[in-house]
Every structure is written in structure tokens, then in C-alpha cells.
Amino acid sequence: MDNVEVFDTGVKGRGLRTTKDLCAGEVVLAEPSFAAVVFDSLSQQVCHSCFRRQANLHRCAQCKFAHYCDRTCQTACWDEHKQECGAIKKNGKAPNENVRLAARVLWRIQKDTGIVSDSQLTSVDQLEDHVADMPADNLKELKIDVHNFLDYCPNTRHGVEYISHIFGIINCNGFTLSDQRGQQAVGVGLFPNLCLVNHDCWPNCAVILNHGKVELRALGKIAENEELTVGYVDFLNVSTDRQRALKHQYHFDCTCKSCSKNLKDDLMMAAKETEGNKPSDELVKEVQELSLECLAKVEAARTAGDFHEVVKLCRECLDKQKPVLADTHLYQLRMLSAASEVLSYLKFFSEAAEYSRRMVEGYMKLYHPNNAQLGMATMRAGVTHWHAGLIEVGHGMICKAYAILMITHGPNHSITKDLESMRMQTEMEQRIFKQNECVYHSMREAALQNKSMGMMAEAVTQPIKAKDQLFIDKP
């Protein structure tokens, strides 16, 4: 923790600032969770210790709820799971993730107090709860959680007010945990030091889960004594929508530069300009309203698993959007994202590649150049082009994604390691492509049909080793 110190920001309360100059990609701090749980919906698919998502997990023989990779993970988690295990057995079932996380927090406070190491900068129970700021609906949900907690832990020594305080802390300080590939949210945890980092819509740091710890990483050069910030919400929303979300979830009014000056709002809602001409305001409004309706239908169809309906809706809407909305318009970018994702799933890679390219080009005009979500989107677009046989564009996108994720995730993260393997693979394939396009496409076709690559290797100027076979084990 030599890199940071707590200071009084004034209006925003406590914050963290650097004690030295930092470079892009540098780890500012790394912190294990004070307590963390897997989401209810993924309790049988994600390890309750390391939060890796995988098949054939081993179930706890006692509570029959917790699942683990192996005996090592179960042993490592036993100290945290022990009381939970007994409570679930006694109740006959596990409560929701909020109640389970609150219980783990309170059990640890009871065992270790609110500070568990010299590197922890604040006690858990000193974090803001904003219970007094909650609207009526949220307070109603909080009371239900407290009631369920008391059923789950009837012998607790804590009163209702203190339990409510812990739920409030979780509500506005909980950090979503992703799986090992960064593709899906799988749980939620509490990280006391991270909770001290304030929000900015254009932050100077990113938060990444890496080997069970969160890492705060610098997105660019940060000067000594500069406040450290992260984005609590996705930047890809107009400033008023971001402010509304922040006020609802975190109970503060965002006055960062991006919000106060409405930076990039014009791009996010721009109409398409062709040779100095723009569509009428009426037409733009009409297409925007149609887009919102279609996005709702797309989400409903995707939730229902009707992916061909998703594709149909996306194609129709994108055809109407293309001549009217700019390539940076949020509604078009959201539609492109949905279309490319589902088309890739259905293996329509050529069409998915075109949509993903347009999406990434729009993202690059809006996001911070080292934004983690930009890096992930660029990686997925690169892989889609790779699958479509567009090796040169695919390799270029994978290289761009690698440069971003080396900063946001670092060289030791599993995503970055996967991306490095893909970068080397596509570089080799691109070399083959430049030597002989026919040979490359023949090899690609053979790989897609699961034929032996050794049969094709003799035709290549530089033979392919077994480990370099085309199109193997791509995410």
C-alpha cells in the first residue's frame, strides 16, 4: 500500500490518492476480498472459492450448496464456509446472495474485527451505507433482507440497525466479480480499500479481478498526489443517464468533467451526416423511438433463447438506423453488439464480423483508449474476424486488444495470456496467408471440418508444428 494514502476530498468525503508518479498499467493496489459469494443462479457452475466457472464441480457433502473445483479450493474456503455450511444445513436451503454475503461479513467482523490486515485502510463497518438516502422501494427490500437474515442466523448478537447498516454497505460498495475469462459476472464481494476509490466517468484507473484479488491498475500516467478514480457505471451512456444511475445506486450527484460539460453526449446521440446533409429532426426522433422498441424486443427474444428472432429484429433495425444515425449513436452500437454476439453464436461469422467491426469503430471514438470494455470488445471482434477467415483484420484487432488489455489486465491475467496465444497464432496464420492464400484457405477448411492438419502441413513453406494447428481451442 506504499502507492496510496487516504485523504479528505471535501465534497466527496474520503478518497485515495497516489504517493508517487505512476505509469500506465502499473498496479496501484491489490486486495483480497473481505468476504465474497457466488450468485444464486450460478451456484452450481462457479467455484465458491476461486470463482472460476467450469463443469464438473464438486459439491460440499454437508450443505449440498457450495461447489468447488477440487479439494484444494474447498480447503482454502473452509474457514469462510464453515458457519455458512452449518446455517444452510439447519435452514434446509441457502438464502439469496445478499443475505449470504451479509452473513459472511458479520461472521468475519465477529471473528477478526472489521480490519483483517495492516494493509487495510479502513474498517468495513466504517464504510458508507446510505440507508437514510434510500427510496421507499429499496428500504422495503432491505427490510425483507434483514428479516431473511434473522431467519438464517437467528442467534446473531447484532441488532436490526447494525444488520441494516451492513446491508446498506453491501448495496453501495459491493464489487461484481467476473469469471476467469472476464466474460460474465459470477458473484459479488466487499473490498474495503477499493471502496475508498471515488468515481469519475473518465477515470484514471481500472479495477480487474485477477487470481482471487482485485487489482487497481493505472490507465495512463498518474502524477503524485493525484486522486485515484474508477468508473462505477459504463461510460457508454449520455451524462444525464449516468448521473441518474449513480444517484439511484450510489446516492451522489456526479459533477465530473464529463458530466458537467456533457462530453461526448453529442456523439452518442448524433445523426448521420452525408456530404454536409443531415436527416430531419423528425426522422431522427422516429428512428430513435423505433430503436428503443426494437432493443426491448431483442432483449426479450434473447432471454427466451429465440436467437433467430434476435437476428431478424437486429437486421431490420440496423437497416433503418444506418442512413439516419451516426456510427457513434448509442442505439446503433447496442444493436450492433447484440447482432454480432448472436450471429457469432449461430456461426454466421462473416455477417457478425461486419457488425463487430462497425461496433468497435464506434467504441474507439467514445471510450478512453485504454478502457477494459473497449479491449474486450476489440478482442471479441478480432476472434469473430478470425473465425470468418479474415485473418489480416482479425490479427490486427487482436493486436490492438492485446495492447489495451496489457494495461487494464496485466501480463499475468488469464485473459491476457489467452490473447497472447491468439496473437501468436494469428501472426503465424497471417504469414501463411501471405505466402499462399489458397493453401491457407484449404488448411482453414480442413480445420473447420476437424481433419488432420498434418495432411496439409507439407504444402506450407514453413511447416506447422502440432501446437500451431489452426483454429484450435479459441474462446
Image (cartoon, rainbow, N blue to C red):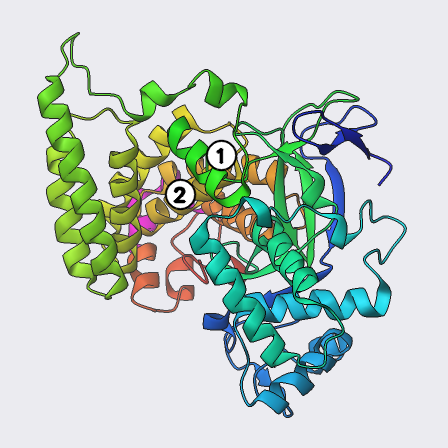
Amino acid type assigned to the residue bearing label 2 in the image: Gly
- In the rendered image, is residue 386 in sight? yes
Relative height, residue 254 to residue 96 (above, below): above
Q: Residue at point 62% right, 90% down?
A: 89
Crowdedness near tag 1: few (<14), some (14–19) or many (≥20) residues, C-alpha within 10 Å: some
Instruction: Write the residue at 55% across / 31% down.
Output: 370
Q: Badge 2 is on which residue?
A: 382
Most prominent secondary structure in the magenta stretch?
helix
Q: Quadrant of the C terminus?
A: bottom left
Marks 1 and 2: CB-CB under 8 Å? Answer: yes
Tell me: 14 left or right of 464.
Answer: right
| Secondary structure of the residue carrying numbered label 2 | helix
Q: 411 or 374, which is in the foreground? A: 374
Q: Residue sitting at 71 percent across and 83 percent down?
A: 71
> At 36% across and 36% down in the image, what residue appears?
393
Q: What residue is pinned by disc 1?
A: 400
Q: Is residue 106 above or below residue 356?
A: below
Q: Is residue 50 visible?
A: no
The magenta stretch spans residue 432: yes
Query: In the image, is 383 to the left or to the right of 63?
Result: left
Q: Secondary structure at mark 1?
A: helix
Chain part drawn in magenta: 429-442
Query: At which x and y percent is residue 206?
Result: 61, 38
State which tag comes first along the sequence, 1 or 2. 2
